Amino acid sequence: MRLVSFVAEGRSSWGAVVDGGIVDLGRRFAAEGLLTLRAFLERGDMAAARAAVAGASADFALDAVALAPVIPDPDKIVCVGMNYRDHVAETGRSVTEKPSLFARYAGSQVGQGAAMIRPKVSEQFDYEGELAVIIGKECRHVSEADALSVVAGYACYNDGSVRDWQRHTTQFLPGKTFAGTGAFGPWMVTADEIPDPSALTLETRLNGEVVQHTTTDLMIATIPQVIAYMSAVLPLLPGDVIVSGTPGGIGAKRTPPLWMKAGDVVEVEISNIGVLSNPIVDEAA
């Protein structure tokens, strides 16, 4: 099942993608107070969503809604840095014993088709195609062996990075959470359809040119390892997002550097999930 968050007719909701349209599950579960996808994940009853979708006709065409970030209101977004060896090599860094983590904020994200914004204080706006993991069950100190059992699903992510601001200090969060620089979508594919997240192909394209290509089995810290590590730090909650790292090929390490600019279109495609596509615009003066 493919689940989305969206805005239609001036109202935010969530639903399931069927035959090129969306079944509005936010409306169907409104009486239960489940107005967001995060709220529904907190209830933990995916079978109820499947039952509501079975035999239902789409309420909206996909092109009649604005797709929001898959989870617009997560409690936390945790990103993994340096999680592919070719990316570690191109940056000149070293592989760390434990996952390198940083945070993103919900307000820095846009959804499928929305513009990613190059901030006016920098021209060094870079792409990072990544696999996003959406948590479906609250967990603490979960083992690696059990880690995939707490996953609700997977999506595409573009961890757009403002490289000069990222390098201002050793703490690179500023370059990772400018408003409108991250993209999350187009939808969440439920975990039952992706039993092994290490068996996917990820590709990033800028204006149709392939700039990143990898398979997720090449991650240094696996999805179960990252979930187990993070759940030792603090509880992971339904709707939390783990952005699992980008492969080599970033624009900053090309000669000359390849920065995203207004008018560009960037795509992140992951097998069994789909394509996240976003135009680039300059921040308004």
Image (tube, helix red, strand yellow):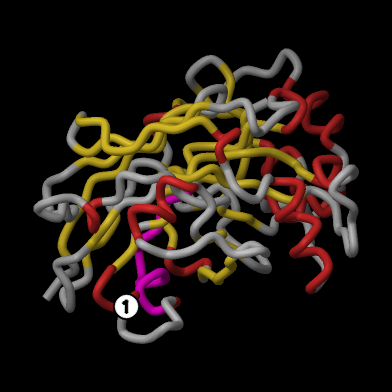
Q: Is residue 273 above or below residue 183?
A: above
Residue sitting nearer the eye, 138 or 91:
91
Q: Closest to the observer: 254 or 285?
A: 254
Range drawn in magenta: 174-184
Q: Position of residue 15 (x, y in %)?
A: 63, 36
Above or below for 172 versus 25: below
Q: Quadrant of residue 264?
A: top left
User: Which x, y percent locates residue 105?
Assistant: 51, 71
Q: Residue at point 40% right, 42% down? A: 112
Could you tell me residue 284's position as x and y percent? Answer: 15, 70
Q: Is residue 7 visible?
A: no
Whether 76 is drawn above or below 281: the answer is below
Q: Could you tell me how many numbered marks the image carries?
A: 1
Identify residue for label 1. Answer: 167
Q: Quadrant of the C terminus?
A: bottom left
| Residue located 45% across and 26% down the image | 61
Residue 30 shows in the view:
yes
Say whether residue 254 is left or right of residue 187: left
Seen at 34% across and 37% down, the residue is 212
> Would residue 265 be counted in the magenta stretch?
no
Residue furthest out toward the bottom: 169
Mark 1, secondary structure of its residue: loop
Residue 9 image offset from top left, x and y in percent: 45, 45
**Could you tell me the amino acid type at mark 1?**
Arg
